[in-house]
Amino acid sequence: MASLRFWSNLVRMKVSVYAAKTQLSRLLDRASEGEEVVITRHGRPIAKLVTAGPGNKPRRLGILAGRLEVGRGFDRPLPARMLAAFEGKR
C-alpha cells in the first residue's frame, strides 16, 4: 500500500489558487500530459485539473436490460416514519 501512495504523489501536483491563476497555461500543458493538478485554497483541495481525454463516447442505453429486476413495491409511498427521516423530521 505504501508504494501506491508513493506513485500517486508523483503524478499529483498541488498549487494554490493564486498560482493556478498566474500559471494556468503551464498547468493545462501538464494536465494534457496526464498529470493531475490539485488546486488548493488555504492548503485544502478545492478543485482538480485533469485532461479531458480524447473525447467521451456517448453512453449506450439499455446496457443492463434484462439483468435487473425491480421489486413490486418499488414505487409505493414510503411509510410516514421513513418519509419524516428523509425530510429531516423526527
Image: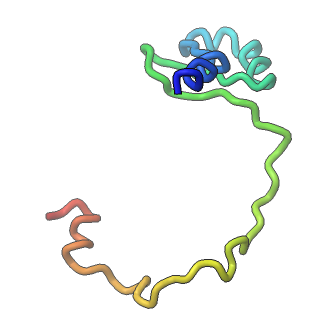
**Above or below, 8 relative to 82:** above
**Above or below, 79 relative to 50:** below
Give residue 42's quadrant in the image. top left
Residue positioned 23% across, 60% down in the render: 88
Closer-to-camera residue (6/31): 6
* Residue 79 in the image, given as x and y percentages of width and height: 25, 80
Closer-to-camera residue (26/13): 13
* Residue 39 in the image, given as x and y percentages of width and height: 56, 20
Quadrant of the frame with the C terminus: bottom left
| In the image, farthest residue toward the bottom | 72
Give residue 35's quadrant in the image. top right
Count of numbered marks: 0
* Residue 29 in the image, given as x and y percentages of width and height: 79, 18
Residue positioned 68% across, 73% down in the render: 64
| In the image, farthest residue toward the right | 54
Residue positioned 63% across, 14% down in the render: 21
Name the side, left or right, on which 5 lies relative to 23.
Answer: left
**Above or below, 15 relative to 47:** above
Name the side, left or right, on which 28 lies relative to 71.
Answer: right
| In the image, farthest residue toward the left | 90
Closer-to-camera residue (83/61): 61
* Residue 44 in the image, given as x and y percentages of width and height: 44, 20
**Above or below, 16 relative to 35:** above
Residue positioned 76% across, 18% down in the render: 30
Q: Colour mode? A: rainbow
